[in-house]
Image: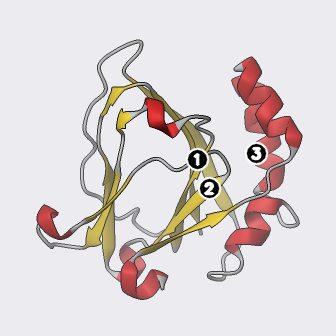
Amino acid sequence: MIATQGYLITAVELPASVLEKLLERNWPELDQVIARETLPGGVIFSKLQNYTKFSQIEFIISIRSSLEQPDEDGIWHDDGSRVLAFSLSLTLDPSEIEGGFLEIRRRGEESSKSETLPTPSYGSMIVFATGHLGFEHKINRVIRGERIIIAGWCT
């Protein structure tokens, strides 16, 4: 499905400590918890191993918000040498967000042919193809609310 459609959406059973650190807005400790889960044996690593072979995961905590400063539209890109990418939602109430869509398309196609995916609910992960399979993506600006996700790449 990823090779033909460019993406799939799946659920990840996150440890309770992720929600705890998220509610505290304790970004350094949340980063440590996610780091453990992206290592071999972690829930994120294990889930992604279902889709392709890779040896490591890089990630960032991405907070895009209309609350503190105006957000910007992203640019189309394909994540270079990475074999797979993902967007793991830590957003508790996606209905409070306007904008912040992930768009995916075959590299070089018109924007009108892209798939536009809203921010999914907490624990849902969009797994998507990179340039290795001929896809590119971008994130649209958040107009209202706050979008919190773990953006990651498998190499």
Q: On the rendered structure, is 116 left or right of 37? A: left
Crowd rating for badge 1 (residues with CA inside 10 Å; few <14, some 14–19, many 20+): some
**Residue underneath mark 2:** 124
Q: Are marks 3 and 2 in contact (CB under 8 Å)?
A: no
User: Which of the two labelled residues, at mark 1 and mark 3, occupies the earlier sequence position?
Assistant: 3
The amino acid beneath tag 3 is Ile
**Residue underneath mark 1:** 121
Circle 3 or circle 2, nearest the eye? 2
**Residue underneath mark 3:** 34
The amino acid beneath tag 2 is Ser
Q: How far apart, in angstroms, are the residues tagged by discs 1 and 3?
A: 17 Å
Q: Are marks 1 and 2 in contact (CB under 8 Å)?
A: yes
In this view of the protein, which residue sits in the foreground, 34 or 155?
Answer: 34
The amino acid beneath tag 1 is Ser
Q: Is 62 located above or below residue 152 in the figure?
A: above
- As helix, strand or loop, the secondary structure at mark 1 comes to loop
Q: Quadrant of residue 51?
A: bottom right
Q: On the rendered structure, is 102 left or right of 53? A: left
